[in-house]
Amino acid sequence: MSDPTPVIDDLREESEELDRLVAGLSPDRWRLATPAAGWTVAHQIGHLAWTDHSALLAVTDADGFRALVERALAAPHRFTDEGAEEYARATPADALARWREGRAALEKALREAPAGARFPWYGPPMSAASMATARLMETWAHGQDVADALGVMRPPSRRLGHVAWLGVRTRDFAYGVHGLTPPAEPFRVELAGPGGELWAYGPEDAAQRVTGPALDFCLLVTQRAHRTNLALTADGPDADRWLDIAQAFAGPPGGGRPPAAGPSGGGRSSAAGPPGGGRPPAAGPPGGGRPPAAGPSGGGRPPEEGAR
């Protein structure tokens, strides 16, 4: 059983970093379009606040969360957009206040959750550590959309280890939602962390391999950048196919981002500046108390529903 405290701490840090990015925005910049079609900065923060509220229901009110799932099933194509729009209609000050209050309440609930408790979600039930990891992944991904809209380059931090871990774990899911049979053998994934350290997953002798910067891998699995603009290398046909369909969030296949203009394959990491986070990286995925997966596994659904 993993101790959720480190990943909950990291979720707080990730949220606070994004908060600092948007706290002083003018109303005009609050309404800037982001790379997600139809979504402004306000929608991105609104979506995070709405999903934090959903997670809080899952942790504290199972019946209330089941009612929310019934609403999602009744309108699966509108559910995520409607949630974001509800919060985005608020003034920037009110939207920020609701996001801050909601994420603080969720943090408190996760810290106070009984050891070993599992909570309902849109996919399989989740532990407190898994819920916090999922929230961190989505906070980072939507924070990337906000940063792109504002023209801000965010330095990568060791917290990317959580996102990378989810990206590896959801390999089989990505194949499944595309109607493909997952490969029987695990892959080897070797990523260069923000400080140059190695994050390795899967057996060393695996025939199928993916290598590259951890930042680029996280941008790929959250579908925040096209693979042609990232410095990732696939060795083997199955690994190459995976890079075209990788998806760390739940729901139907995501649309991803189109290739950006300019030279292909250059990666995003080299321009990202020095690593952030303040603490030295762990050996393997930091924070969650879990060892690296022995190859991408987990045929079920990943933890977040519909990261846009």
Image (cartoon, rainbow, N blue to C red):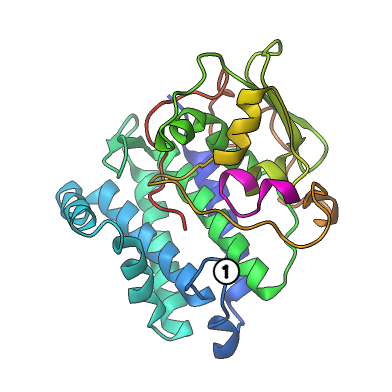
Q: Is residue 179 magenta?
A: no
Residue 66 seen in this snapshot: yes
Residue that sits furthest to the top in the current view? 205
How far across and down, in percent of the image, does residue 225 sit? 65, 53
Residue type, numbered disc 1: Asp
Which residue lies at the image location 59% right of the left edge and 64% below the top edge?
145
Which range is magenta? 220-229
Q: Is residue 40 left or right of residue 79?
A: right
Secondary structure under tag 1 reads helix
Which residue lies at the image location 58% right of the left edge and 62% below the top edge?
143
Q: Is residue 107 above or below residue 81?
A: above
Q: Is residue 242 left or right of residue 255?
A: right
Q: Which residue is mark 1?
A: 19
Residue 126 image-quadrant placement: top left
Q: Is residue 193 above or below residue 198?
A: below
Q: Is residue 228 left or right of residue 238?
A: right
Which residue lies at the image location 58% right of the left edge and 81% below the top edge?
32
Looking at the figure, which quarter contains the N terminus?
top left
Q: Is residue 223 magenta?
A: yes
Q: Nearer the viewer, residue 168 or 291?
A: 168
How far across and down, in percent of the image, does residue 305 sit? 38, 49
User: How many labels, in total?
Assistant: 1
Neighbour tally class for label 1: few under 14, some 14-19, many 20 plus, Cα within 10 Å: some
How far across and down, in percent of the image, does residue 135 sit? 46, 50
Q: Is residue 186 left or right of residue 57?
A: right
Q: Is residue 136 above or below residue 78?
A: above
Q: Nearer the viewer, residue 31 or 244?
A: 244
Q: Nearer the viewer, residue 269 or 257?
A: 257
How far across and down, in percent of the image, does residue 244 sit? 60, 40
Q: Is residue 134 above or below residue 262?
A: above
Which residue lies at the image location 80% right of the left edge and 56% below the top edge?
272
